[in-house]
């Protein structure tokens, strides 16, 4: 695997950071090499460093295509913070010169609108789509049709957990005092629990009010991260379903804040997410 001369950009969405590579015109990293290449690129000592690698790809179904790989080399369905960085990248690099775009991901087509400040992309509003609470969609091995505020024993203690899928799977746990949660211990224990055959992202939330909460994340395949967009979306929707949140909620993550507006689509709940994205630097592998 030779990555010499590989051009990339480093970006972050409220601290959730990514390496972005343009493959919209041609494949830059051979498919067979992508998992190992992404492991190297995400390594914070020997590579560039990041919570994932994003690839810009062509699409037959949308304006542009999106792929994401985790630091462990596995491919993810989608990342909410990553897709805002992705939109900023394709706009800045003039791959797409439009302030509203459709993006094909493994979890469906997402619509993104860019808000500008002094002619610079500032905020990105993403329709994150609708969520499913069905255990078969998580997937989750349970005799319940939905696992909402269900009891799950983790490390000799029982937790009230809500399972939700919004293109990728999330475990939502509301707690009284988030500062007392040992996320480095509980995160991997829940992520790799036998009840989740494809593993799961884990989030702990402390409610401040009907419109505000604090959130901490353990991401599947990545560990503790400063932010998780799909996790925050899942949190907003779950909190609304449980009566803890109103339709508009502000979530405080370690890397910054994200806003959500919940909507009904038939019998399903969906959400718009609004937040920033930042270009850190452009680089080339030596």
Image (cartoon, helix red, strand yellow):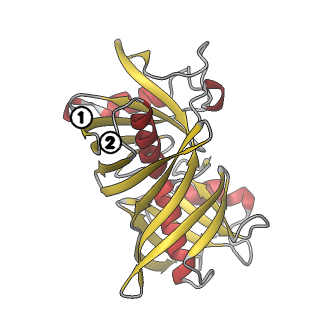
Q: Which residue is mark 1?
A: 178
User: Badges 1 and 2: C-beta atoms under 8 Å apart?
Assistant: yes
* Residue 242 x/y as whole percent: 40, 29
* Residue 139 x/y as whole percent: 62, 29
In this rendering, is residue 30 above or below 283?
above
Q: Quadrant of residue 58?
A: bottom right
Q: In percent of the image, x 63 and y 53: which residue is there? A: 35
Observer able to see residue 90: yes
* Residue 84 x/y as whole percent: 49, 65
Badge 1 crowding class, 10 Å Cα cut-off, few under 14, some 14 to 19, many 20 or more, is: some
Q: Which residue is mark 2?
A: 216
Label 1 to label 2: alpha-carbon separation: 8 Å
In this rendering, is residue 102 above or below 237?
below
| Total numbered labels placed on residues in the image | 2
Q: In percent of the image, x 50 and y 40: which residue is there? A: 220
Q: In percent of the image, x 54 and y 57: which residue is there? A: 127
Q: Residue furthest bottom?
A: 119
Name the disc covering residue 116, or none. Answer: none
Q: Quadrant of residue 151?
A: top left
Disc 2 element: strand
Observer able to see residue 47: no
């Amino acid at each position: 695997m030779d990555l010499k001369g590989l051009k990339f950009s480093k970006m972050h969405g409220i601290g959730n950071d990514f390496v972005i590579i343009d493959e919209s015109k041609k494949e830059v990293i051979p498919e067979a090499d992508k998992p190992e290449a992404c492991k190297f690129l995400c390594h914070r000592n020997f590579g560039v460093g990041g919570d994932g690698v994003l690839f810009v790809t062509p699409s037959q179904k949308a304006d542009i295509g999106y792929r994401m790989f985790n630091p462990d080399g596995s491919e993810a369905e989608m990342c909410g913070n990553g897709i805002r960085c992705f939109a900023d990248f394709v706009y800045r690099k003039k791959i797409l010169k439009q302030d509203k775009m459709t993006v094909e991901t493994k979890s469906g087509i997402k619509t993104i609108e860019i808000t500008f400040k002094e002619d610079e992309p500032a905020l990105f509003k993403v329709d994150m789509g609708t969520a499913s609470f069905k255990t078969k969609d998580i997937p989750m091995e349970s005799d319940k049709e939905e696992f909402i505020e269900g009891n799950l024993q983790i490390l000799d203690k029982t937790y009230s957990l809500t399972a939700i899928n919004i293109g990728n799977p999330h475990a939502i746990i509301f707690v009284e005092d988030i500062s007392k949660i040992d996320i480095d211990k509980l995160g991997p224990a829940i992520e790799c629990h036998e009840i989740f055959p494809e593993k799961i992202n884990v989030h702990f939330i402390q409610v401040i009010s009907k419109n505000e909460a604090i959130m901490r994340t353990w991401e599947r395949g990545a560990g503790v991260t400063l932010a998780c967009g799909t996790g925050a979306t899942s949190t907003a929707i779950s909190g609304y379903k449980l009566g803890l949140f109103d339709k508009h909620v502000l979530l405080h993550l370690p890397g910054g804040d994200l806003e959500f507006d919940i909507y009904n689509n038939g019998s399903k709940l969906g959400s718009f997410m609004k937040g920033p994205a930042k270009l850190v630097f452009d680089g080339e592998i030596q």
